[in-house]
Image (cartoon, helix red, strand yellow):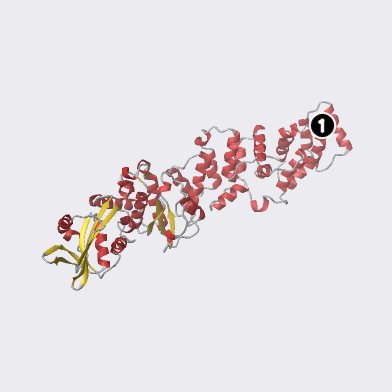
């Protein structure tokens, strides 16, 4: 009894001719492989290799896929299976299972063809009382055997140029990832075309390497091959119409989406965990794509990743652009190995010709300072304070120094594992009611402006006094002759009373009050009265107790 099934239309004579010519080259993957020519009546079906185990058949399919053989035929000795289509498709799935030892196999091989078909003829008890199948597979590949041979050779050269002796696994992954994102672009031209018009090579590592452009399948395939060739296990995972890699590092697998990183030097999708953020942006609804792999819920991090992110942040916030790779590498090395601190780096950016060339207004300048050093938007009160200071002669450099030495900047630097380089001992002084310098600065607000200090202004004057950039007298002068004080409409009587409170730390006595008022009445200026109070022994004692210069 002979039953014939056709799942794809194949001309038997063509199949037979092709495979007779290619048997010796492509099929003998088993030491005990043998040929067989099945006879039914007076008809011979052709001489092909005969395999008696699914393992051997999967190895045959794998060998032919790697060699890009478009069509191949063989016999399978196999007991009857009811769903023969499912069985034959399962053999292909087995052939393209992950193979860490072979970069050209596994996930790379699984996406090496656009489509495939198969046909089979079933012979009941056709071979030594066992069922027999004559099977033909036909594959439509994206690339040819010669193209793949060339790619394999050139990728080996690339890998050898990127991977140096003594590199850690992290350094290998970063080197390969960095080369791809800085040398390959996304193939928008083909991506935006209908499927029938696309160049099929846009899906290949071949295009990603030689044409320097591809869609996600080509990019992830290139990353897959290079990583495996460097000894780094990884898989290609698919979610919807997008794919990326999960990469093994320190016993766990992390997401690396090189496609979404193309053209960037600071990375958002490098060694990411199964975080809510990554899942949301990639549309991951469940963990099925991670089955069998340990993907942590947190991102991978180390000093290099944190430092590069810190430097990249300054490029983005201060200069308004992505970092160039040479600059990113340089400043990262300066921070990690050369003793550079956060303050020095920030000053280098703000004092650079590139930043100065942006020709920012004072308000724009302050907005960037807040973003860079406080990691937040500027608030109305803070903006008003700093603009007032700058309009009264405070230089941008002085304002910058204040932000560099702020507690907020110190906290940001610590979050990246970097020494901030700030001049203050925040553990003892910042936000401490017992800090005498801070108390002195606060008195400037309460005694002269007759209001509580705002946080930005209080921090600024505290820092300026501690750093000896201003004296007690010069700080007091800035308040007494500030725009805010002038606009308050304080008359001479109240003016004198407030000077008593600030410089002598008490209310006025009548005799003293009459004396100062008479001087004002006789034509003395408020500035002269100010310096009269500032030169008092009482004020000298106040400054001394605060530990600041008069």
Q: Is residue 537 visible?
A: no
Camera-side residue of 354 and 84: 84
Residue occupying the far front of the picture: 1
Q: Which residue is mark 1?
A: 492
| Residue 362 falls left or right of residue 10 | right
How many numbered circles are shown?
Answer: 1
Residue occupying the far right of the picture: 510
> In the rendered view of the protein, which quadrant contains the N terminus?
bottom left
Residue located 77% across and 44% down the image: 541
> In the rendered view of the protein, which quadrant contains the C terminus?
top right
| Residue 65 falls left or right of residue 281 | left
Residue occupying the far bottom of the picture: 129
Q: Quadrant of residue 210?
A: top left
Camera-side residue of 72 and 102: 72
Label 1 element class: helix
Residue located 51% across and 39% down the image: 319
Q: Residues within 10 Å of mark 1 (few under 14, many from 20)?
A: some
| x, y percent for residue 477 | 72, 35
Q: Is residue 542 visible?
A: yes
Image vertical order of residue 394 relative to residue 259, above or below: above
| Residue 263 falls left or right of residue 42 | right
Camera-side residue of 199 and 531: 199
Q: Quadrant of residue 228?
A: bottom left
| x, y percent for residue 104 | 30, 56
Residue located 58% across and 41% down the image: 369
Q: Quadrant of residue 63?
A: bottom left
| x, y percent for residue 427 | 65, 53
| x, y percent for residue 300 | 47, 57
């Amino acid at each position: 009894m002979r039953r014939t099934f056709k799942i794809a239309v194949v001309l038997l004579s063509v199949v037979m001719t092709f495979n007779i010519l290619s048997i010796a080259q492509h099929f003998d993957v088993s030491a005990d492989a043998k040929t067989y020519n099945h006879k039914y009546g007076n008809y011979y079906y052709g001489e092909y290799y005969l395999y008696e185990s699914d393992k051997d058949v999967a190895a045959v399919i794998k060998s032919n896929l790697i060699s890009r053989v478009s069509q191949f035929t063989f016999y399978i000795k196999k007991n009857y299976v009811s769903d023969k289509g499912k069985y034959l498709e399962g053999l292909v799935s087995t052939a393209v299972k992950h193979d860490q030892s072979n970069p050209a196999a596994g996930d790379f091989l699984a996406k090496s063809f656009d489509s495939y078909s198969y046909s089979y003829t079933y012979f009941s008890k056709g071979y030594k009382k066992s069922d027999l199948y004559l099977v033909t597979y036909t594959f439509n590949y994206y690339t040819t055997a010669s193209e793949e041979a060339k790619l394999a050779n050139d990728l080996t050269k690339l890998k050898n140029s990127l991977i140096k002796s003594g590199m850690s696994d992290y350094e290998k992954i970063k080197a390969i990832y960095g080369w791809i994102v800085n040398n390959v672009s996304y193939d928008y031209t083909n991506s935006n075309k209908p499927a029938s018009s696309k160049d099929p090579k846009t899906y290949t590592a071949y295009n990603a390497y030689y044409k320097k452009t591809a869609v996600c399948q080509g990019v992830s395939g290139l990353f897959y091959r290079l990583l495996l060739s460097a000894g780094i296990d990884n898989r290609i995972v698919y979610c919807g119409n997008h794919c990326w890699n999960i990469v093994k590092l320190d016993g766990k697998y992390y997401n690396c989406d090189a496609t979404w990183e193309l053209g960037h030097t600071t990375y958002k999708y490098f060694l990411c965990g199964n975080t809510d953020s990554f899942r949301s942006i990639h549309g991951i609804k469940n963990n099925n794509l991670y089955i069998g792999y340990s993907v942590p819920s947190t991102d991978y991090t180390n000093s290099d990743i944190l430092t590069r992110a810190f430097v990249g942040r300054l490029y983005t916030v201060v200069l308004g652009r992505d970092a160039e790779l040479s600059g990113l590498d340089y400043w990262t090395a300066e921070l990690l190995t050369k003793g550079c601190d956060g303050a020095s780096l920030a000053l280098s950016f703000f004092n650079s010709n590139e930043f100065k060339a942006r020709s920012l207004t004072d308000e724009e300048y302050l907005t960037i300072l807040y973003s860079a050093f406080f990691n937040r938007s500027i608030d109305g009160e803070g903006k008003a304070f700093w603009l007032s200071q700058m309009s009264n002669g405070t230089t941008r450099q002085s304002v910058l120094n204040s932000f560099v030495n702020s507690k907020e900047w110190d906290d940001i630097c610590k979050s990246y594992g970097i020494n901030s380089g700030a001049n203050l001992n925040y553990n003892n002084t910042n936000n401490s009611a017992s800090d005498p310098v801070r108390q002195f600065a606060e008195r400037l607000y309460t005694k002269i402006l007759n209001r509580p200090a705002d946080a930005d202004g209080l921090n600024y004057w505290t820092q300026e006094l501690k750093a000896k950039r201003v004296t007690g007298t010069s700080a007091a002068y800035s308040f007494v002759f500030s725009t805010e004080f002038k606009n308050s409409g304080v008359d001479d009587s109240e003016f004198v009373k407030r000077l008593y409170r600030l410089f002598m730390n008490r209310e006025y006595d009548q005799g003293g009050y009459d004396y100062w008022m008479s001087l004002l009445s006789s034509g003395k200026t408020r500035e002269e009265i100010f310096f009269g109070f500032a030169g008092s022994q009482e004020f000298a004692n106040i400054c001394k107790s605060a530990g600041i210069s008069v």
